[in-house]
Image: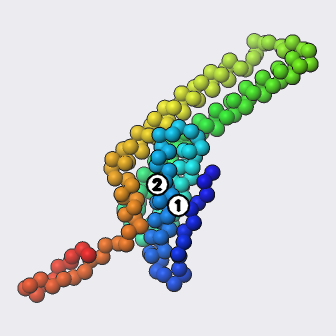
C-alpha cells in the first residue's frame, strides 16, 4: 500500500484556508498520480488509487465549510469512485478466499498421495462448485473494472481533474470598483 504523501510548509500562524489549500493540493496531486493506473486491472494498483481517493475525500470533507458547493460536487465524485473500487476489492477478496480453499483441498490430497493413500473422490467434492464460483468472480471483476474505467472516463470528460485542482486555488474575491458615473459594481478579481 502506498504511503500518504507528506504535506510540507504548514504553519500554525497561517490562516486556516491557506493551510487547507496546501493539504488539498498535496492530496489532489497524490490522487492524480494514480490516474495512469485506471486501465491497469491489477488489484494492487487499483487498491492504491482507492486509498488515495479515500484520503482526498476525507480531506475535502474536513474542509467542507471552506469549499462549499464546489467541494461537495467533488466529494460525490470521489464517493462514486470509491464505491466502484470497493466493489472491485470485494471481488479480489472473494477470489483470494476461493483460491485459498482450492489450494487447501489440493494440498490435502497431495499429502494423502505422499503417504501412499489414494485420495478419496466423492460426489461431495466441493471443487467443481468452487471453480464455478471462482470463474463467476473473475467475470464479475472484469465487468466491474470496465464499469469503473467508464465512470473514470466520464468524470474526465466532465473536467474532474480541473475541478479538483481548482479546490486548492485561492478563492476568487469580489471587490468594488467605481464606475465613471460614481456607482460601484462588484468585479471578480
Mark 2: few, some, or many residues within 10 Å (few <14, many ≥20)? some
Circle 2 is placed at which residue position?
32
Relative to 73, 19 lies left or right: right
Residue 155 shows up from this direction: yes
Number of the front mark, 1 or 2: 2
**What colour-coding does the image apply?**
rainbow
Camera-nearest residue between 32 and 57: 32
Q: Distance between the Cα atoms at labels 1 and 2?
A: 16 Å
State which quarter of the image contains the C terminus. Answer: bottom left
Image location of residue 73, percent across then percent down: 39, 57
Image location of residue 42, percent across then percent down: 56, 39
Mark 1: few, some, or many residues within 10 Å (few <14, many ≥20)? some
In this rendering, the answer to whether 27 lies above or below 98 is: below
Label whose residue precedes the other's in the sequence (1 or 2): 2
- The residue shown at (73%, 20%) is 126
- The residue shown at (31%, 73%) is 172
- The residue shown at (49%, 54%) is 33
Residue 79 shows up from this direction: no
Circle 1 is placed at which residue position?
58
Image location of residue 80, percent across then percent down: 46, 48
Image location of residue 9, percent across then percent down: 53, 75
The tag on residue 188 is none
In this rendering, the answer to whether 77 lies above or below 169 is: above
Res. 94 image quadrant: top right
Question: Marks 1 and 2: CB-CB under 8 Å?
Answer: no
- The residue shown at (87%, 22%) is 111
Mark 1, secondary structure of its residue = helix
Amino acid at each position: 500500500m502506498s504511503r500518504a504523501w507528506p504535506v510540507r510548509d504548514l504553519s500554525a500562524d497561517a490562516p486556516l484556508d491557506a493551510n487547507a489549500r496546501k493539504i488539498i493540493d498535496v492530496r489532489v496531486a497524490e490522487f492524480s498520480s494514480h490516474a495512469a493506473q485506471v486501465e491497469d486491472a491489477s488489484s494492487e494498483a487499483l487498491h492504491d488509487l482507492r486509498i488515495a481517493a479515500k484520503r482526498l475525500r476525507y480531506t475535502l470533507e474536513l474542509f467542507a465549510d471552506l469549499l462549499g458547493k464546489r467541494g461537495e460536487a467533488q466529494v460525490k465524485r470521489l464517493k462514486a469512485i470509491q464505491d466502484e473500487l470497493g466493489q472491485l476489492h470485494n471481488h479480489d477478496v472473494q477470489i483470494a478466499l476461493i483460491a485459498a480453499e482450492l489450494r487447501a483441498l489440493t494440498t490435502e490430497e497431495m499429502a494423502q498421495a505422499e503417504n501412499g493413500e489414494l485420495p478419496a473422490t466423492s460426489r461431495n467434492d466441493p471443487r467443481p462448485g468452487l471453480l464455478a464460483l471462482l470463474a463467476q468472480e473473475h467475470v464479475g471483476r472484469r465487468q466491474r473494472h470496465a464499469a469503473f474505467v467508464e465512470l473514470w472516463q466520464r468524470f474526465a470528460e466532465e473536467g474532474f481533474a480541473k475541478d479538483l485542482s481548482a479546490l486548492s486555488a485561492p478563492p476568487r474575491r469580489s471587490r468594488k470598483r467605481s464606475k465613471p458615473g460614481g456607482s460601484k459594481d462588484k468585479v471578480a478579481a
